[in-house]
Image (tube, rainbow, N blue to C red):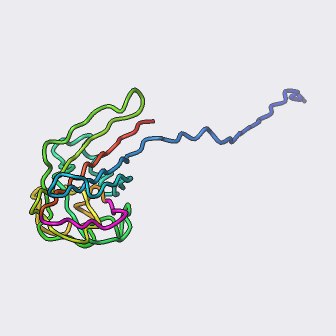
């Protein structure tokens, strides 16, 4: 009788450990500058604030990376709604549109580096000149991507970004209102 003296042992070892999570620091944001000038050219109101790019805006900007036919921004619209700006849902689109306030961009958007490692900035400017949109309760502005800039409310699906003013603006017939909107794309 023979005896097998070989001992075969199987061993399985499994180690689970949490790998290092990679967090992207990419961000889309920026600011809005609002300047209201009286008929004499003097500044009547000035405000600067952080703008909110909506979920639709995020999608449009991301889509533009591979499809240069996508319209990102065609103009701006004004309204009287004071609902807080939001990424989606209520506040992601124009709340209360002011008839006739749809305004095409003054010129083509410009872009420039913010410095090495600090990202890029795209700037959009719209000016409502004297006689345009006379209203005593302007409270909101939005960037729209409507391919035919229409005289209607910019729904959330048409709103790239939205900003609600700290105080309502009283734009008289002789006043001009300029909105400079900066969108910053910040890399990791």
Please identify the quadrant where the N terminus is shown: top right
Q: Position of residue 95 (x, y in %)?
A: 28, 71
Between residue 150 and residue 129, name the one nearer to us: 129
Question: Is residue 166 a member of the stretch shown in magenta?
Answer: yes
Locate residue 172: give its quadrant: bottom left
Question: Is residue 3 a member of the stretch shown in magenta?
Answer: no
Asked if residue 92 is positioned above or below residue 104 in the image, the reply reads: below
The magenta span reads 163-173
Please identify the quadrant where the C terminus is shown: top left
Query: Residue at 24% of width from left, 73% of height from top?
Result: 96
Q: Position of residue 67 (x, y in %)?
A: 21, 42
Q: Position of residue 48 (x, y in %)?
A: 35, 52
Q: Is residue 155 left or right of residue 128?
A: right
Q: How many marks?
A: 0
Query: Residue at 12% of width from left, 65% of height from top?
Result: 173
Between residue 28 and residue 107, name the one nearer to us: 107
């Amino acid at each position: 009788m023979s005896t097998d003296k070989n001992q075969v042992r199987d061993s399985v070892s499994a180690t689970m450990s949490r790998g290092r999570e990679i967090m992207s620091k990419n961000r889309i944001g920026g600011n809005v500058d609002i300047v209201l000038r009286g008929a004499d050219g003097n500044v009547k109101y000035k405000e600067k604030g952080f703008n909110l790019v909506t979920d639709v805006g995020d999608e449009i900007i991301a889509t533009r990376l591979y499809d240069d036919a996508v319209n990102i921004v065609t103009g701006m619209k004004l309204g009287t709604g004071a609902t807080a700006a939001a990424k989606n849902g209520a506040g992601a689109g124009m709340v209360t549109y002011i008839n006739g306030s749809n305004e095409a961009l003054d010129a083509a958007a410009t872009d420039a580096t913010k410095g090495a490692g600090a990202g890029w900035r795209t700037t959009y400017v719209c000016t409502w000149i004297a006689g345009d949109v006379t209203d005593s309760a302007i409270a909101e502005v939005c960037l729209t991507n409507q391919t035919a800039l229409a005289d209607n409310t910019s729904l959330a699906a048409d709103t790239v970004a939205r900003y609600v003013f700290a105080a309502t603006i009283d734009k008289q017939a002789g006043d001009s209102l300029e909105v400079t909107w900066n969108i910053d794309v910040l890399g990791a």
